[in-house]
Image: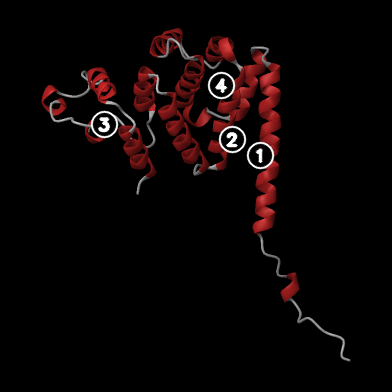
Amino acid sequence: MDPFLVLLHSVSTGLSSGELTELKFLCQGRISKRKMERVQSGVDLFSVLLEQNELDGERTELLRELLVSLRRLDLLRLLDDYEAGAAGRAAPEEQDLYAAFDIICDHVGKDWRRLARQLKVSDGKIDAIEVKYPRNLMEQVREALRVWKSTAREGAAVPHLVEALRACRLNLVADLIEEDQQARGLQRENESGSSTVSLMSWDAPSTRASS
């Protein structure tokens, strides 16, 4: 079964009736009144959002926004686990970028606005992020990075993050990312080496000393 659908089912199961009501209220501008009247569960709500292309396995921002509004950290962890799994299935460069994101979220703190401006995220988008996640600093940082990645597209790469961090004099965070990147590169080399089957032992038949 699609891992994203499994996630949505798990989230739906974890919702109370009051929380479902709150989610329906938050989605009023996205779902017509007629469709909303048929929503009796979280699965129903998510199904409508999927049908309307408001939500999918690669665009989880709305789901995160809804769970942040509920302050359900346990369900947010499920989403984090799903996104980590998606990152694990991504190309190596994409995995490296997500790893750098995690380090920045853990260490940048309130300096995220300065970093966002260095990454050319507009003040309007920065203000919108603060409104969207008013009491969640880590989500503010992560959303700023998402906005930058979406805007930069192919230009969103780890070296650009490191350069921006150093320009903001956040050298410790830049150093942590570079160290992590080196470790990840070595790990990939080792995994590649271990997966290569040596044929040397098959080049010649083994011989035994005759007694």
Q: CA distance from mark 1 to mark 3?
A: 38 Å
User: Nearer the N terminus, badge 4 or badge 3?
Assistant: 3
* Residue located at (68% from left, 12% from top): 169
Please, what secondary structure does the residue beneath circle 2 have? helix
Q: CA distance from mark 2 to mark 3?
A: 33 Å
Q: CA distance from mark 2 to mark 4?
A: 14 Å
Q: Nearer the viewer, residue 121 or 28?
A: 28
Tell me which amino acid carries mark 3: Gly
Residue 158 sits above or below residue 68 on the image: below
Between label 2 and label 4, give the one nearer the viewer: 4
Label 2 crowd (10 A; few <14 / some 14-19 / many >=20): many
Residue assigned mark 1: 184
Between label 1 and label 4, give the one nearer the viewer: 4
Q: CA distance from mark 2 to mark 1?
A: 8 Å
Percent position (x, y) of residue 166? 67, 17
* Residue located at (39% from left, 9% from top): 131
Percent position (x, y) of residue 147? 45, 21
Horizontal side of residue 210 vs 123, given as left or right: right
Tell me which amino acid carries mark 4: Cys
User: Nearer the N terminus, badge 1 or badge 4?
Assistant: 4
Residue 43 sits above or below residue 205 on the image: above
Please, what secondary structure does the residue beneath circle 3 have? helix
Q: Which mark is residue 42?
A: 3
Please, what secondary structure does the residue beneath circle 4 have? helix
User: Nearer the N terminus, badge 2 or badge 3?
Assistant: 3
